């Protein structure tokens, strides 16, 4: 077996491991919950940080900065609880791509790499260069979750099981 086939086989086995996928789902959900918790108490400061990046026009940057923490909260809760996990993984992937674009633009413009990233508000201070690495890692995690489609220990699977059960009792 070639090296690539072995790697694909290993990746396929990993994606089929429901415990690994559950752990990744909880990890990614926790990252988004932590991020939202750090931004929401001082949302105006986060909006200022987003506009300061200069990636988006002022109005769009303000809207993005205002909506992002709430979207992170919703996606984080969805991933942790297992409510629409594939939708949440897809939404997280889109957010992560926007983070990579913002942080990549920051680096490309040759701003200081050791500048703090507003990723987690006041809860956790990380440098932009570290945030960019983290963004790539969580992008891989979100992609695996999106592709796996695992419904292990999700509220969705529990709810659908209950609904199907009601249909059987009605007969």
Image: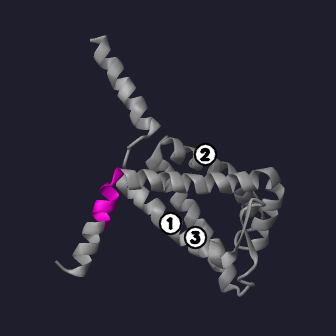
- Marks 1 and 2, how far apart at CA: 18 Å
Q: Is residue 77 above or below residue 107?
A: above
| Lower position in the chain sequence, tag 3 or tag 1 | 3
Sort mark 3 into few (<14), some (14-19) or many (20+) by Cα contacts within 10 Å.
some
Quadrant in which residue 4 is drawn: bottom left
Q: Where does the image place residue 160, in percent across and percent down from the top left? A: 38, 31
Q: Position of residue 94 (x, y in %)?
A: 54, 61
Report which residue position mark 1 lands on. 139
According to the image, what is the colour scheme of the structure?
one colour
Q: Is residue 67 visible in this depiction of the protein? A: no
Residue receiving disc 3? 134
Rendered residue at 40%/54% (across/down): 21
Mark 3 vs mark 1, foreground winner is 3
Residue 43, picture quadrant: bottom right
Residue 84 position, x and y percent, is 47, 43
Q: Is residue 90 left or right of residue 5?
A: right
Residue 74, given in percent of the width and then of the height, sits at: 61, 45
Quarter that holds the N terminus: bottom left
Q: Secondary structure at mark 3?
A: helix
- In which image quadrant can residue 17 be found? bottom left
Q: Which residue is located at x 57 percent, y 49 percent?
A: 75
Q: Is residue 98 visible?
A: yes
Residue 112 lies in the magenta stretch:
no
Circle count: 3
Instruction: Please state the extent of the stretch shown in magenta in the rendering.
Output: 11-18
The numbered disc on residue 104 is none
Mark 1 neighbour class, 10 Å CA radius: few under 14, some 14 to 19, many 20 or more = many
Please state if 22 lies on the left or on the right of 12 as rendered: right
Q: Residue furthest left?
A: 1
Say whether residue 66 is left or right of residue 88.
right
- Per the image, the residue denoted by label 2 is 74
């Amino acid at each position: 077996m070639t090296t690539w086939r072995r790697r694909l086989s290993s990746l396929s086995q990993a994606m089929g491991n429901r415990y690994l996928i559950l752990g990744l789902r909880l990890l990614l959900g926790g990252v988004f919950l932590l991020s939202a918790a750090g931004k929401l108490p001082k949302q105006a400061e986060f909006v200022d940080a987003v506009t300061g990046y200069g990636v988006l026009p002022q109005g769009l940057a303000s809207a993005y900065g205002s909506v992002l923490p709430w979207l992170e909260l919703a996606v984080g809760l969805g991933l942790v609880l297992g409510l629409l996990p594939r939708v949440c993984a897809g939404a997280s992937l889109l957010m992560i791509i926007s983070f990579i674009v913002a942080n990549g633009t920051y680096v490309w413009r040759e701003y200081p790499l050791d500048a703090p990233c507003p990723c987690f508000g006041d809860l956790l201070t990380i440098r932009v260069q570290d945030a960019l690495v983290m963004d790539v890692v969580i992008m891989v995690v979100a992609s695996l979750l999106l592709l796996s489609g695992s419904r292990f220990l999700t509220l969705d699977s529990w709810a659908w099981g209950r609904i199907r059960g009601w249909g059987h009792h009605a007969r």
